[in-house]
Image: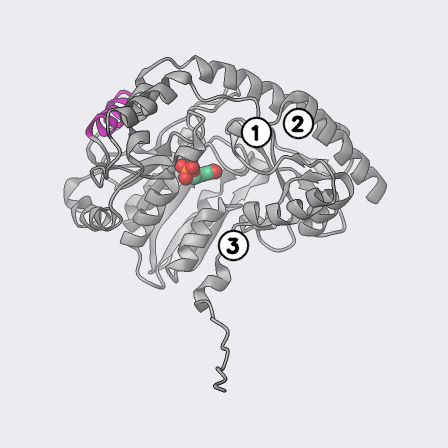
Amino acid sequence: MVTKAVAEVMAASRMMNVRYAIRDLAVAAEEVAREGHEILYLNIGDPCKFDFHTPPHMIEAVLKAMVDGHNGYAESLGIKPAIEAIRHQAERDGFRDIQSIFIGYGSGEVIDSCLTALLNPGDNVLTPSPEYPLYGAILAKLDCPVNAYDLDEDKGWEPDVDEIASKINSRTRAILLITPNNPTGAVYSRHTLERILELARRHNLVVFADEIYDKLIFDPDARHVSVATLATDIPVVTFNGLSKAYLVPGWRIGWAIATGPHELLHPYMGAVHRLLRARLCAPHPFQYAVKPALEGPQDHLEQMLRKLRRRAEITMQWAKRTPHVKLVAPKGAFYAHPTLHIPEDDLTFVTELLKQKHVLVVHGSGFGEKPGTRHIRIVFLPPEHVLSEAYEAMTDFIQQRY
Ligand code: PLP
């Protein structure tokens, strides 16, 4: 008899740092659900799981594309009508010197391609803390350390520009800005963005502007300023997509717009395009929704903003009446990021809240926060009655436990 040695298949060591806390927690929730409990999900930024519905004209456009036979591979950078619609909107919004537009499998894929084409192992990107964990996962995959800069809770979660300046070193290649922000709901001021652009100018940094929530600002006094509209002499790559404001996260359609001087961007964009050709294309028929989305009726947005405004208010009211909780009012996106003044770490809080009250939120440490900070990220997309039930349970939990 021949016996075979069984060797464990080891994962690459750089995978140790690849985490996505938002989805990792869902596994724990499944266990609680299997025990027969109904879970109140305040953890995933997918409006389609709640009372937000894809505009029907977008669905019709995709069905038509399929019936018309657009089911093969598409152009690697994206289909022409979609690219043109993105370009027209960007120009209307004040983008100048557009060098390249390309569509990917969600903005997540174009973010990955843009980081991969830029960075050598050991290079670093100035990344906000708290961060959106996709960036940390991609940087870990590329063997690039995260160079975290703090968002300042005492200044409405705006970046601390002096701190950013102090973090720049010889391997810093880029700075990432997420506005409106996930997970804090902050919308950065023009003044802050201008100061950061000045740093990028001085240190030859590429600016990555993740603006996927740009249309989801519900605070009447807040205004979205697109980073790319503030400078034409700096390479800026802006990320956006259909997932959030157009209510189709499962269609996986996102894009990037690269602006700035042609001579600075040319070799870099050539590398991005080669990567995009190697992976063939983004989902083809769904790209036919981009033009009708950007140029068709926008009434769903108005309804969405009305709901988000109300749900943000309910969230603030909860924070105000609950001991040990402090919350900076969110202005955009659909996230709130309160601090908990509690003697336990945030993962214990989240895990116990799930087990005892069946409410699921995400721990702040899952967003790359520095050790010792105690935050949770709340997604306030659920309807008012679900939010009220969840907040009541959370208040009870906090009062009983602390
Ligand atoms: N960027 C930010 C800040 C996000 O919050 C998300 C999703 O939650 C994404 C990018 C990825 O979006 P998608 O890949 O669906 O376009």
| Mark 1 to mark 2 CA distance (whole Å) | 9 Å
Q: x, y percentage for residue 226?
A: 35, 29
Residue at the far bottom in the pictured view: 1
Q: Give whichever of discs 1 and 3 has the lower sequence position.
A: 3
For image coordinates 41% across by 17% down, the residue present is 56
Residue 315: numbered disc: 2
The answer to if 82 sits in the magenta stretch is: yes
Q: Is residue 283 above or below residue 290?
A: below
* Marker count (numbered): 3
Q: Secondary structure at mark 3?
A: loop
* Residue situated in front as seen by the camera: 180 or 79: 79
Q: Secondary structure at mark 1?
A: loop
Q: Give whichever of discs 1 and 2 has the lower sequence position.
A: 2
Please give the residue where the numbered disc 3 appears in the rendered image. 19
Q: x, y percentage for residue 352?
A: 75, 47
For image coordinates 68% across by 26% down, the residue present is 386
Q: x, y percentage for residue 366?
A: 57, 49
User: Which amino acid does the dot numbered 3 rest on?
Assistant: Arg
Mark 1 and 2 residues: CB-CB less than 8 Å, in contact?
yes
| Mark 1 to mark 3 CA distance (whole Å) | 26 Å
Residue 291: numbered disc: none
